[in-house]
C-alpha cells in the first residue's frame, strides 16, 4: 500500500475526505495527490499524521499499528522530522543509526 493509499484509507475510516485532511493539516488543496509520485515534506507528513491521529511510521508503512506511540523514550517531533527528512525509505538499521546520532547531538547541545 502506498503512502497516499494509507492516508486515503485512514481518512475514510476517520470520516474525512482528502480535502478535509489537507485543510485541517494546513496544506494546499490537492497537495497530497502529488504524494503519489513524490515524497512529501516531513512537516506536511507530520501534520497529516497529527490530523489523523496516527504515527508517521504508520503512514510510511513502517508499522501496521496506526496508534501514535506515547512512550517517553520516543524522539521528539523535531527529531523525527530530521530523521525522516534524510530519507523515508531507509532501513531499520540506518534509521536507528540516525536516531543514535540525533540523541548524541542532543547530549552535546545540553553541554553547551
Image: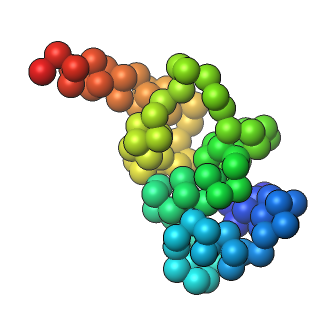
Image: 78 above or below 8: above
Task: Evaluate whether residue 102 shows in this view.
Answer: yes
The residue sitting at 52% across, 80% down in the picture is 28
Image: 41 above or below 84: below
Residue 57: give x, y in percent of width and height.
64, 43
**Furthest-bottom residue in this view:** 29
Task: Evaluate whether residue 5 shows in this view.
Answer: no
Image quadrant occupied by the C terminus: top left
Residue 63: give x, y in percent of width and height.
73, 39
How many discs mark residues in the rendered view?
0
The residue sitting at 40% across, 42% down in the picture is 78
Residue 2: give x, y in percent of width and height.
72, 61
The image's colouring method is: rainbow
The residue sitting at 52% across, 73% down in the picture is 27
**Furthest-front residue in this view:** 24
Image: 108 above or below 31: above
In the visual, does 85 lie left or right of 109? right
Image quadrant occupied by the N terminus: bottom right
In the visual, does 9 lie left or right of 59? right
Residue 17: give x, y in percent of width and height.
77, 75
The residue sitting at 61% across, 23% down in the picture is 71
Depth check, front residue: 92 or 57? 57
The quarter of the displayed image where residue 3 is located: bottom right
In the visual, does 19 lie left or right of 46? right
Amino acid at each position: 500500500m502506498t503512502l497516499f493509499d494509507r492516508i486515503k484509507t485512514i481518512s475514510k475510516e476517520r470520516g474525512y475526505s482528502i480535502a478535509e485532511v489537507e485543510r485541517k493539516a494546513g496544506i494546499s488543496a490537492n497537495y497530497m495527490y502529488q504524494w503519489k509520485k513524490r515524497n512529501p515534506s516531513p512537516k506536511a507528513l507530520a501534520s497529516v499524521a497529527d490530523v489523523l491521529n496516527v504515527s508517521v511510521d504508520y503512514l510510511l508503512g513502517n508499522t501496521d499499528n496506526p496508534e501514535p506511540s506515547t512512550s517517553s523514550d520516543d524522539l521528539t517531533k523535531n527529531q523525527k522530522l530530521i530523521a525522516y527528512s534524510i530519507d523515508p525509505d531507509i532501513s531499520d538499521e540506518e534509521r536507528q543509526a540516525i536516531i543514535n546520532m540525533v540523541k548524541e547531538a542532543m547530549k552535546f547541545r545540553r553541554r553547551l
